Every structure is written in structure tokens, then in C-alpha cells.
């Protein structure tokens, strides 16, 4: 009987701790912009905040420097790109930029491009991700995630 009471107490405590938390649902991003319009750091931070979310857009199938198809989340996709930057003889950079989608638009279109250049054109590539940040609440629109690039 003691074990049963202990089990009920643990389950009740777990429900209180996790069931009533203010953590976001899996399809919600807790990050909010700190500056409007977003600066480069805000754009990178927004990208990092969605790393656990799935890449659902068709532009992400086979995207990246190796054309890998196993990357299911934003974090896996970006990680696969970043590990390719380890060549000390190459020029690598990360470019973040954003713009309003329309003068009176409801979101900022932003993009992060990770570029690699070494020698001839065959070794040069740039891959990244584009998305929208809503003006209304400063959050990433998860439906807008698109993989970009070539190489």
C-alpha cells in the first residue's frame, strides 16, 4: 500500500510540474525578437530557437552540401552545413539579412546563408535557410521555413 501511495504521489507531482508548465507546445516558438526590424544577431538567434522543429518544405529534401536526405530538423540541417566549414584553407562566412515582405507587410523575410569558398567553382557552395518573423508577436512563422542555396 505504501508503494501505491508513493507512486500516486510521484505521478501527481509530475503532473503538477510538467502538465501545468508554461513551456511552449511543440509547434510553438518561445523566442521573440528583441529589436525591430531584426538585426543580424536577432536573425541568427531566431534560427537557433527553431532548431528542434521539423523541415516540412519540399525545398529541404536533399538540400545541403552533401545532399543528405536524413536531416529532419532545422538543427540537423544547419549542423550538417556547419561541420563542412572545417577546412582551414577555405574562406567561410555566415551572412544574415532581412527585409520587410511588403511596405505594410505583416512579417520580415529573413535568411541565413552559410558559404564556403575554396579554389575553383566546383568547391564553392552556399546553403542556408529562409523564414518569416511575424511583426505581430516577433516569433518565427514555422510554416515559412525554406531551405536555400546551391553548390
Image (spheres, rainbow, N blue to C red):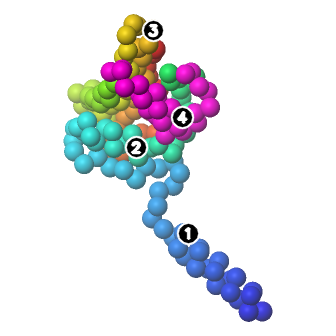
Q: Looking at the image, is mark 1 or mark 4 nearer the viewer? A: 4
Q: Residues within 10 Å of mark 4 (few under 14, many from 20)?
A: many
Kindly identify which residue carries mark 2. 48
User: Judging from the image, what secondary structure is the residue with disc 1 in?
Assistant: helix
Q: Disc 2 versus disc 4: distance between alpha carbons?
A: 14 Å
Is there a contact, CB below 8 Å, between mark 3 and mark 2? no
Indicate the position of residue 9 as horizontal and vertical percent values.
64, 84
Q: Looking at the image, is mark 3 or mark 1 nearer the viewer? A: 3
Camera-side residue of 35 and 72:
72
Which of the marked residues, 3 or 2, is nearer the chain's N terminus? 2
Indicate the position of residue 1 as horizontal and vertical percent values.
78, 92
Region rendered in magenta: 66-91
Magenta-span inclusion, residue 74:
yes
Which of the marked residues, 3 or 1, is nearer the chain's N terminus? 1
Which of the marked residues, 3 or 4, is nearer the chain's N terminus? 4
Which of the marked residues, 1 or 4, is nearer the chain's N terminus? 1
Kindly identify which residue carries mark 1. 19
Residue at image x 47%, y 32%? Answer: 83
Q: Disc 3 versus disc 4: distance between alpha carbons?
A: 27 Å
Kindly identify which residue carries mark 4. 55
10 is higher (above) or lower (below) than 115: below
Amino acid at each position: 500500500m505504501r508503494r501505491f501511495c508513493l507512486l500516486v504521489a510521484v505521478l501527481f507531482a509530475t503532473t503538477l510540474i510538467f502538465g501545468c508548465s508554461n513551456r511552449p507546445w511543440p509547434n510553438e516558438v518561445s523566442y521573440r525578437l528583441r529589436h525591430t526590424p531584426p538585426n543580424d544577431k536577432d536573425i541568427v538567434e531566431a534560427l537557433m530557437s527553431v532548431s528542434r522543429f521539423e523541415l516540412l518544405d519540399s525545398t529541404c529534401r536533399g538540400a545541403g552540401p552533401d545532399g543528405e536526405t536524413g536531416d529532419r530538423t532545422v538543427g540537423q540541417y544547419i549542423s550538417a552545413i556547419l561541420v563542412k566549414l572545417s577546412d582551414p584553407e577555405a574562406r567561410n562566412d555566415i551572412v544574415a539579412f532581412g527585409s520587410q515582405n511588403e511596405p505594410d507587410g505583416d512579417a520580415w523575410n529573413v535568411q541565413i546563408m552559410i558559404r564556403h569558398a575554396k579554389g575553383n567553382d566546383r568547391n564553392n557552395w552556399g546553403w542556408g535557410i529562409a523564414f518569416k518573423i511575424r511583426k505581430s508577436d516577433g516569433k518565427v512563422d514555422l510554416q515559412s521555413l525554406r531551405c536555400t542555396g546551391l553548390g
